Amino acid sequence: MAANDKYNNFYFHPSLQSLSLMFMGTNEMHVIFPYAATLKKLDLQYALLSTEDHCQLIPRCPNLLVLAVREVVGDRGLEVVAQTCRKLRRLRVERGEDDQGGVEDEQGRVSQTGLINIAHGCPDLEYLAVHVSDITNAALESIGTYCKNLFDFRLVLLDRDERITELPLDNGVRALLRGCTNLGRFALYLRPGGLSDAGLGYIGEHSKSIRYMLLGNVGESDRGLMLFAGGCPNLQKLELRSCCFSERALALAVMRLPSLRYIWVQGYKATPDGSDLSFMVRPFWNIEIIPSGSEPDSDSQAQILAYYSLVGKRTDLPSYIRCIPPS
């Protein structure tokens, strides 16, 4: 039996609206064509499709509200999404595998081109999480201009390509935050040089409604962190990755964020004994210090975890974690 005849007698329910596909390839793709127009949710993260396959399938799905793909969709695939899925509310573009033996398409890279098309074509987006290989300020500005309903925005700048078209992204981030005033969750994981101290200050200034934030490789010095901490009046949960900030600056920043309930920092300029963290000691505020090179990951960066708790520190602490008790 030929591969494309294998599923000829396979049928989905005619009212099918949500579909998640695993290991489906080009030869099996035709099976879902008769049902594509009724789909509202489609997950292709684990499908084995090329960029061209995405461009063939997505035009048949004009009523999608939720779409999840890998970056193999490429800028060309995102252009098709923007042209077809005008009602789209949630879009997730996950990182593809780098070593899948040729499965990932060479065209499958997402850049500012794809983001600009999505911003223009999908104005009702509420959730956008995307891994990109290249980015510009103009792409972020487009999102701020056209995606006014955005509540949750997450962008990761991958480290595959040596050259990025435009860094830092200060002006683009400012424009996005100014335009997307309904944002409640914001994540930005860049590369060194991706955001200056001024850009970090823009995040603080224009994040009045944001309650959760993750930032990676942002800022240039402690000054940027203090500019950031002067804003964000409603920020409750903050995660920082691979940052250049000193222990003292982190402690002082925490004290300037009035609504903060939780902070997790991975990678910072730690003191030998964590003494500078004493600046953020306060009632019910539990501080945990995880030294660099701690077991079980000998290559791990120094970390800080701090959180409010009325019942004290957690009871499952590993032996290598040191605690600073509340005042």
Image: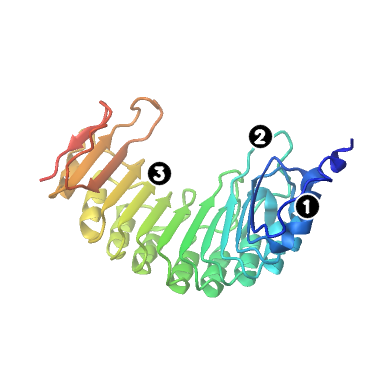
* Dot placed on the residue nearer the N-terminal end, 2 or 3: 2
Indicate whether 250 appears above or below 299: below
Query: Which of these two is toward me, 96 or 136?
Result: 96
Q: Residue 11: image x %, image y %?
A: 76, 50
* Alpha carbons under labels 2 and 3: distance apart: 25 Å
In this view, the residue farthest toward the right is 1
Q: Please tell me whether mark 2 or mark 1 is closer to you in this view.
A: 1
Is any atom of residue 279 visible in this view? yes
Label 1: which residue? Answer: 52
Residue occupying image coordinates x 51% and y 62%: 127
Amino acid tagged 2: Asp
Indicate whether 184 appears above or below 271: below
Label 3: which residue? Answer: 242
Label for residue 99?
A: 2
Element carrying mark 3: loop
Amino acid tagged 3: Ser
Is any atom of residue 218 visible in this view? no
Q: Residue 222: image x %, image y %?
A: 30, 52
Q: Residues within 10 Å of mark 2 (few under 14, many from 20)?
A: few
Amino acid tagged 1: Glu
Query: Which of these two is toward me, 193 or 73?
Result: 73
